[in-house]
Image (spheres, helix red, strand yellow):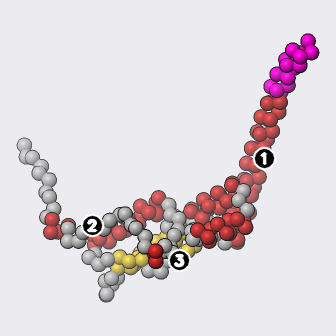
Amino acid sequence: MKRMIPVTPSKKEFQEEPCPSTYIRSKKVDTNQHIFLTAEDSFKRLISVVDWHARCCKEKLKPTKMLKKGHVCKTSLKCNDKETPHVFSWSSSPYLPTKDYLVNSRVNHGITCSGILPAVYKRFAPGSGIGVISDENRTSFFKVHSQYIQEEYKYSTDIALLQEIASYEELDSKIDIMSDARHG
Ligand SMILES: [Zn+2]
């Protein structure tokens, strides 16, 4: 029976450059760099695309201008090939079937559920540099989901009210016993 012996790739082929460190210490001048929110699938897809490119092309990929769409970053990756450069569009968020960004919709959901005031959000988001969802986008999200928000609101307040009533009934019975002891 033949034994399979793993073939070790030659060091020369894979170690032409030192591997970049994944620990980055920001310099003072770099603290204003772009910050954005991303989603797991978009991050994984970026790795796949860079991986595919590295197998097919020896040039390096670089991001072009970064645009903010709410909390999402939209950019293109372009390689240095002078004649036929590879270009990939990349967004830091997947799209929903409605064509909205998943990331912005999740933030809109958080804004709605937390009860944060629009004025507070509009100071917090640009202040942190993570982008900001426009008034129009937030309003349209709220309009689309307001019916479901109302239903959830009614359901949760009804439940809370029933629990409150139930707790009073329990309390009443305890008070009855206590008052019997005091006045008995
Ligand atoms: Zn290329």
Residue matched to label 2: 19
Identify the residue at image location x=49%, y=67%: 92
151 w.r.t. 12: above or below: above
**Residue at numbered disc 1:** 154
Hey, what amino acid is under mark 3?
A: Leu
Secondary element under disc 2, as helix, strand or loop, is: loop
Against 55, residue 173 (above or below) is above
Q: CA distance from mark 1 to mark 3?
A: 40 Å
Pick the quarter of the image with the C terminus: top right
Q: Note whether ligand 1 is within 8 Å of mark 1.
A: no
Amino acid type of disc 2?
A: Cys
Q: Position of residue 173 (x, y in %)?
A: 84, 21
The amino acid pointed to by label 1 is Lys
- Which of the two discs, 1 and 2, labels the residue nearer the N terminus? 2
- Report which quarter residue 98 is drawn in: bottom right
Q: In the image, is residue 174 part of the stretch drawn in magenta?
A: yes
On screen, residue 58 above or below 84: above
Name the residue beneath numbered marker 3: 67
Q: What are the residue bounds of the magenta stretch?
A: 169-184
Q: Is residue 13 left or right of residue 164?
A: left
Which label's residue is closer to the chain start, 3 or 2? 2
User: Mark 1, mark 3: which one is toward the viewer?
Assistant: 3
Of residues 38 and 91, which is closer to you in this image?
38
Q: Note whether residue 183 is visible.
A: yes
Q: Is mark 3 within 8 Å of ligand 1?
A: no
The residue sitting at the right extreme is 183
The front one of 177 and 60 is 177
Of 65 and 26, the residue lying toward us: 26
- Locate the N terminus by quadrant: top left
